[in-house]
């Protein structure tokens, strides 16, 4: 197995995923800023339980406050309105090719992939997020493992981010399987020191 080529966008190397507003927007911005200072190269915002208004406000605030690209989960319309760098779509949302025509130049579109069928339906996307790669206690799907990750990445033929159970210990395995980068939720945003957590993963990745 070989590491991903240098053609992948640098922003995909370490994606910090924020998934709630449990402590309020100010606290979320502070954790996101810490993650960026620790080496995160992109922030993905997931707020499925919040209203569109709240998601728009949170995205705008992060875009203005965090010095790395911000992508919003699922809602391309809100991402464009907020001036985000892109959107990450799930398989149940609009296909990337339907979103691409009305987004601005340079707008990133990612799509989640967990099956071979999903990996074949990524036209119009810039990258794919494949997972869960490693064991995640709360996940509804079984862990794919690095070999299946590599197979799905080969079918999608796009830069692939590994997600699910990513830590400083598992991140190098994902890159060795061909990942362009990793997406990390709990290991960064649930850490007492998000900057240190991001720094440890970035160091483990080795670039």
Image (cartoon, rainbow, N blue to C red):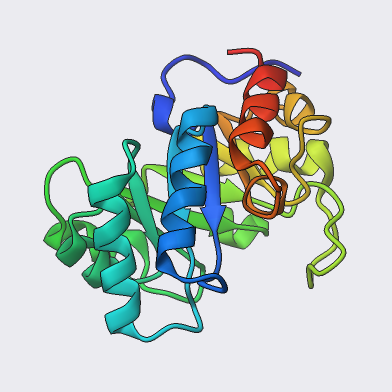
Percent position of residue 75, x then y: 33, 71
Q: Is residue 34 above or below residue 203?
A: below
| Residue drawn at (70%, 48%) of the image | 192
Of the 4 image quadrants, the one containing the N terminus is top right
Q: Of residues 74 and 36, which is closer to you in this image?
A: 36
Of residues 80 and 4, which is closer to you in this image? Answer: 80
Which quadrant, please, contains the C terminus?
top right
Locate residue 57 relative to residue 12 in the image: left or right: left
Q: Is residue 41 above or below residue 96?
A: above
The picture quadrant where one finds residue 198 is: top right
Q: Position of residue 83 (x, y in %)?
A: 18, 55
Residue at the spot x=29%, y=47% of the render? 65
Say which of 150 and 41 sits in front: 41
Asked if residue 174 is positioned above or below residue 65 in the image, the reply reads: above
Between residue 131 and residue 205, name the one nearer to us. 205
- How many numbered callouts? 0
Residue 41 found in image quarter: top left
Give the quarter of the image for residue 69: top left
205 relative to 99 in the view: left or right: right
Q: Is residue 188 visible?
A: yes
Write the residue at 70% across / 15% down: 2
In the displayed structure, would residue 54 be above or below residue 1? below
x then y, percent, for residue 174 = 73, 31
**Residue 191 place in picture, x, y as percent:** 71, 48
| Residue 120 visible in rendering | no
Name which residue lies at 73% across and 31% down. 171
């Amino acid at each position: 197995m070989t590491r991903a080529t240098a053609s992948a966008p640098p922003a995909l190397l370490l994606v910090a995923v924020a998934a709630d507003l449990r402590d309020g927007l100010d606290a979320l911005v502070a954790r996101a800023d810490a993650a960026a200072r620790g080496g995160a190269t992109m922030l993905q915002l997931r707020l499925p339980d919040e209203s569109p208004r709240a998601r728009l406000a949170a995205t705008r605030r992060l875009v203005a406050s965090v010095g790395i690209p911000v992508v919003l989960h699922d809602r391309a319309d809100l991402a464009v309105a907020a001036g985000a760098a892109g959107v990450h779509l799930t398989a149940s949302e609009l296909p990337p090719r339907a979103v691409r025509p009305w987004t601005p130049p340079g707008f990133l579109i990612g799509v989640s992939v967990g099956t071979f069928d999903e990996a074949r339906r990524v036209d119009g996307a810039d990258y794919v997020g494949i997972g869960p790669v490693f064991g995640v206690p709360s996940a509804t799907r079984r862990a794919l493992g690095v070999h299946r990750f590599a197979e799905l990445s080969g079918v999608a033929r796009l830069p692939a981010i590994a997600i699910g159970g990513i830590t400083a210990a598992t991140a190098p395995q994902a890159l060795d399987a061909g990942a362009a980068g990793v997406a990390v939720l709990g290991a960064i945003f649930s850490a007492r020191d998000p900057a240190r957590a991001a720094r440890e993963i970035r160091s483990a990745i080795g670039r």
